[in-house]
Image: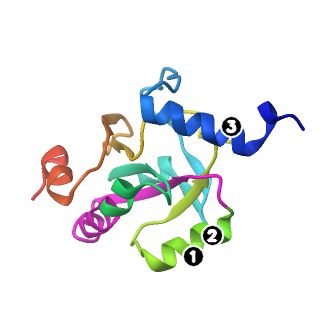
Amino acid sequence: MTLLHSASFRSAVFGLALAFGLAAQAAMPERPTLHVTTLDGKTFDLSAQRGKWVIVNYWATWCVPCIKEMPDISRFVAGHRNVAAIGLAYDDSEPADIKAFIARHPVVYPIAQVTLEKPPKDFDEPRGLPTTYLISPDGKVAKHIVGPVTEASLAALIGQP
């Protein structure tokens, strides 16, 4: 295998692209779909969440701002019955390593792993991490945020105390 085709080379190039905001962006559909298997083997289907706000949060184990925002997202989801979340670990790590990370940094929402090779088809690749999409109760993208969110910023964006 040549260096250009190695997974570590692709990961390094993607990391640089994220750092400089150069990742290519595709047009997102008005009502994106997301159907992923979570690390605990369950299925998360965005369309099954209609009627709720959904926080779709791209993060990585090596991303310090991602780690900092995870407790805020958890508290917000735990405090609002009409809000759900899915964490998308945008990481080439082994699933066992991500599970161990989550054991050290627990959250109240499910986590699925997505990679450069298998990105969700209806969501743009993140231009930086963390990246969050707020999906309104009717399934439309209400907000796209690059950078960390807080419990207070989520409340302001969703319009709930």
Percent position (x, y) of residue 68?
Answer: 31, 62
Percent position (x, y) of residue 31?
Answer: 44, 32
The structure residue drawn at horizontal position 51% and vertical position 27%, both measured from the top left corner, is 23
Q: Residues within 10 Å of mark 1 (few under 14, many from 20)?
A: few
Residue 34 visible in this rendered orientation of the protein: yes
On screen, residue 125 versus residue 7, left or right, reads left
Is the C-beta separation of discs 2 and 1 under 8 Å? yes
On screen, residue 10 versus residue 107, left or right, reads right
The structure residue drawn at horizontal position 39% and vertical position 72%, both measured from the top left corner, is 108
Residue 123 visible in this rendered orientation of the protein: no
Residue underneath mark 1:
100
Residue underneath mark 2:
97
Locate the N terminus by quadrant. top right
Numbered range of the magenta stretch: 69-93
How far, Cα to Cα, is label 2 from label 1? Answer: 5 Å
Residue underneath mark 3:
10
Percent position (x, y) of residue 47?
Answer: 48, 47
The structure residue drawn at horizontal position 12% and vertical position 48%, both measured from the top left corner, is 156
